[in-house]
Amino acid sequence: MKSKPPWIPDALWRLIVAFAIIIGAVIVVRMLIPPAMKDSAIHYASTVERETIKPVRYAGSSICADCHEEFELKKKGYHQNLSCETCHGPSVMHTEDPGAVKPEAPRKREFCAHCHIYDPSRPTGFPQINPAIHNPLKPCISCHNPHDPKPPNVPEECRACHEEIARTKAVSPHVMLTCTTCHTVPRGHKTSPRAVNATIPAGREFCGGCHSDDSKVKDAPKIDLKTHNEKYVCWQCHYPHMPELD
Amino acid sequence: MMRRKFFRKATTVLVSTGLLAGMWKKARAKTPEGYDPSLHYYGMGIQIDKCIGCGSCVEACKSENNVPREPFFFRTWVERYIIRKDGEAAVQNIDERLAGSRDVINEKEIMRSFFVPKLCNQCDNPPCVQVCPVGATFMTEDGVILVDSERCIGCRYCIQACPFGARYIHPETMTADKCTFCYHRLTREMLPACVEVCPTQARIFGDVRSKASPLARFKRMNKLHVLKPSLNTEPKVSYSELDGEVR
C-alpha cells in the first residue's frame, strides 16, 4: 500500500478499496459482458435473426407460373412434379430482374444423365438409359422436350422403352426368344403404355411348355413340374429375362 | 503523472466498453415479422424408394447455404448402400452427382442397392446441444437446431457427439455448421432448398403436428423408422422403406 496518501486513515482506505472493487464488478457485469451472454433468450434471438436475414437463392416454382407458359405444358407431363429450379438452377436473381439475369438452361446430355443414366441403385421402373448406346452424342433435347418428355416416336421395338430388359436378355439363355414368345402386346400398349399393359404368362404350365419333362423342346433344361416346388410360380425364383443356370 | 496515466486508461476502458455495449445492442433481435415460430414444429420425411441418387438436393443445399464445394463438407448428402450377395454392405457417398462413382460396382455382385439421403435429424433430444461447452447451439421454438457462429469456439465436441455425422467445421469461419432446414427460407414460408428441387419428391417437409399435410399423409401411409433409434435422440427426420443395414 505504498500508493496510499498519508492523510487518509487506514480504515477509510480499506473502505475505498472495497467500494472500488464493488463498483468495478458492477461495471464489468453491466457493461463489459454483452447482454446476450447473460440472457440466453437474447442470445437465441440474435442467432435466429442472423439466420433469417440470410439471402434466399432458390425462388420456389410457384412464382415461375406468373410469367412462363411452359408451366402449363409441364403440368401434364412426366416432369410435372419437378420444380423449375431442379434443372434451371437457383433463380431468385432472375425473379428480381427478369431482363438482366437469365437462369441457366442446361442442354448437354450429361445434365439429363444426372437422373436418367442407368444405375443399379436406382428404384426399378425409373426411366434410365445407357448413354453409350442410346443415340450417343446426340443432345437429349433434340428428341425429348424437357418440359414434356416422352419418346419421340411410337417405339418400333420393345427395347426402345424396355432397354434394360433387352440388355439383360441379350446375355441370358433366353436371348433367342422374342418378347412376343411370352408376352402378348395389345396394340394400345405402344401408344399408351401405362394404360394398356402387355400380358405376362399366366402360370407354371406356360414355362412347362419348354421346361417340363414331357416337353418336346430339346435344349431347354428340364424339371418335373409336379415335384419342383409346386407351391410357387416360376418367376418367384427365376427371373425370366435372366434365368440362372445353376 | 500517476493521475494522468489513470485518467488515460480509464477513458479508454470507458469508451471501449461503451462501444462494445453499443454493438451488442445493435445485434439484439426482433423475431422476423409475420412469422410466428410458436405455430410451427418442423420435421421431414424421406422415402428411400423414391430417391434416384441424382444429387440435386446436395447441389441445391450447397448453393443455398454457401456450403464449401469440396466433397467433404455437406449439410445434406446422399449415401449409396450396396448389399452384396455375400451379405457384405458397402456405403459410398454420392458426390459430384454420380460422376465416377458408378464404375466401381460389379452389378452381378449386388443383392440389393439403394440410396439414402441424409441430413441433420433435428433431434428432439439433441446430443450436440448437451455437449456444447459455451451454449452456442440450441433448439428454436419451431424445433430447428441452430448454431450461433459468433459464440461457437470451434471445439468440435458437437461433431463428436452427433451420431449422424451431420456437423462439420466450416473452413472459413472455423465454427460448427450444419443443416438448418434452410431456416431463412422457413421464415419466409418457403420449403428447404433440398425439398424444393427433389425431382421425385423423395423428401417431404412439413409441420410434425399438422393434421392434413404431405408430411402427415406420409406418416399415416408408411411404415416409418428413424436412424439409430436406440440412442433415444428422437430424430424429427423419419424414413420409409429404411433397410436394416442403414447406419
Image (cartoon, helix red, strand yellow):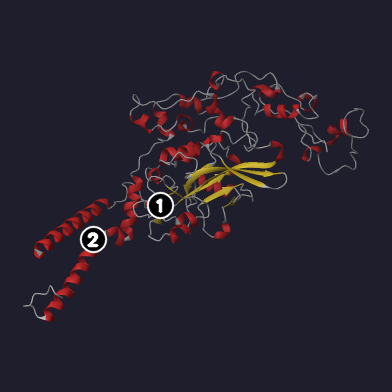
Mark 2 falls within which chain?
A
Residue A104: image quadrant is top left
B11 relative to A108 in the view: left or right: left
Q: Amino acid at mark 1?
A: Leu
At x 76%, y 28%, the residue is A171
Mark 1 falls within which chain?
B
The residue identified by callout 1 is B146
Would you say residue A162 is visible in this rendering?
no
Element class at badge 1: strand
Q: Which mark is residue A32?
A: 2
Q: Amino acid at mark 2?
A: Leu
Where does the image place residue A125, in percent across and percent down from the top left? 64, 33
At x 33%, y 60%, the residue is A40
Are dots 1 and 2 on a single chain?
A: no
Observer-nearest residue: A188 or B157?
B157
Would you say residue A198 is visible in this rendering?
yes
Element class at badge 2: helix
Give the vertical position of B135 relative to A12 (above or below): above
Where does the image place residue B232, in percent across and percent down from the top left? 54, 60
At x 75%, y 26%, the residue is A170
Observer-nearest residue: A13 or B236?
A13
Give the vertical position of B1 relative to B246 (above or below): below
Where does the image place residue B115, in percent across and percent down from the top left? 59, 42
